[in-house]
Image (cartoon, rainbow, N blue to C red):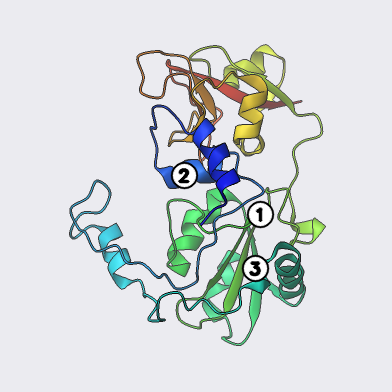
């Protein structure tokens, strides 16, 4: 459910030639922020088809969807949702995090069901953690300002996953957060040029982790025209702008929360956005 004013905004920026799922676009390219989609802990819908583009009978994704619980609450019985109002929710989230025990991924095996745990991570570690927690492996889903709240699959302990590199993940103590290199220089590469080569031309170097700080639509829009919008794709050369008019993503800016960007990657159809450091 959205207000009419929100739809008025969305319809103006909706891609003319969508090349990604609408849910990815809403998270990354729609300009909805600071608005977010609200996702219930127990789904009220169920994916029942097994012959779609992404879900096929017998596939790992189909098996995962089949295992998912579905809410048995009567329709429209949502209860009091005032706790989701921004100020109340933020205050409760911070309170929950302050009382949580700080752990690492190697400690997931011995959690107590009545405890709350705070687990900092970076995106390159996410898929490994997600497999252990039996949540979406491809990319962080249901995140709020870099934070995902889930439960351990056996102990049912409450776990707060917090992205160290997300500037909005304020639930983390400062000692657990990561920030861009103070000497970072953001620069767009030439067509087909890797960030390694660009940074070398500038007398600097590229580090994979630094690319994460420019892997967002706001950073792309500062450097490229993005005539056909900003959307989500998968590729180690992302974030990038597609200059090749023959591509289905032509004139789009691309970001990703799936693949982890690599300094060495390049593609002849794109121009990369790079982050070089001294």
Provide residue 157's location: percent of width, then percent of height.
Answer: 56, 80
Look at mark 1 in the image and give the residue it sits on: 145
- Give the residue pinned by disc 3: 84
> Which class describes the residues within 10 Å of circle 2: few (<14), some (14-19), or many (20+)?
some
Q: Is residue 48 left or right of residue 200?
A: left
What percent of the width, then of the height, locates residue 216?
A: 60, 36
**Residue at screen point 29% across, 62% down:** 47
Task: Say if residue 104 shows up in the picture.
Answer: yes
Residue found 43% across the figure and 59% down from its top: 136
Position in image of residue 40 (x %, y %) = 50, 69
Of badges 3 and 2, nearer the viewer stands 3
Residue displayed at 57% across by 38% down: 9
Q: Which residue is mark 2?
A: 24
Using residue 204 as the reference point, say whether residue 48 is left or right of it: left
Q: Earlier in the sequence, mark 2 or mark 1?
A: 2
Res. 207 in view? no
For the image, the number of numbered tags is 3
x 20%, y 54%: residue: 56
């Amino acid at each position: 459910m959205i207000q009419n004013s929100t739809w008025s905004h969305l319809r103006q920026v909706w891609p003319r030639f969508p090349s990604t799922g609408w849910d990815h676009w809403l998270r990354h390219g729609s300009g909805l922020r600071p608005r977010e989609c609200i996702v219930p802990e127990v789904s009220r819908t169920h994916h029942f088809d097994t012959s779609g583009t992404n879900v096929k009978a017998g596939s790992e994704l189909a098996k995962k969807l089949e295992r998912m619980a579905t809410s048995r609450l009567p329709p429209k019985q949502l209860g009091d949702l005032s706790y989701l109002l921004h100020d109340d929710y933020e205050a409760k989230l911070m309170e929950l995090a302050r009382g949580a025990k700080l752990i690492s991924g190697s400690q997931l095996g011995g959690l107590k069901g009545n405890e709350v745990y705070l687990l900092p991570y970076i995106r390159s570690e996410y898929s490994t953690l997600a497999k252990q927690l039996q949540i979406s492996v491809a990319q962080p889903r249901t995140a709020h300002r870099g934070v995902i709240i889930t439960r351990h699959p056996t102990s049912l302990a409450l776990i707060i996953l917090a992205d160290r590199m997300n500037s909005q993940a304020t639930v983390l103590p400062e000692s657990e957060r990561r920030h861009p290199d103070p000497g970072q220089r953001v620069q767009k590469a030439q067509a087909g040029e890797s960030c390694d080569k660009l940074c070398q031309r500038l007398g600097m170097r590229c580090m994979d982790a630094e690319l994460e700080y420019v892997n967002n639509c706001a950073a792309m829009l500062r450097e490229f025209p993005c005539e056909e919008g900003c959307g989500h794709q998968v590729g180690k050369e992302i974030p990038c702008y597609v200059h090749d008019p023959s591509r289905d993503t032509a004139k789009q800016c691309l970001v990703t929360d799936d693949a982890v960007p690599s300094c060495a990657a390049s593609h002849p159809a794109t121009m990369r956005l790079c982050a070089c450091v001294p």
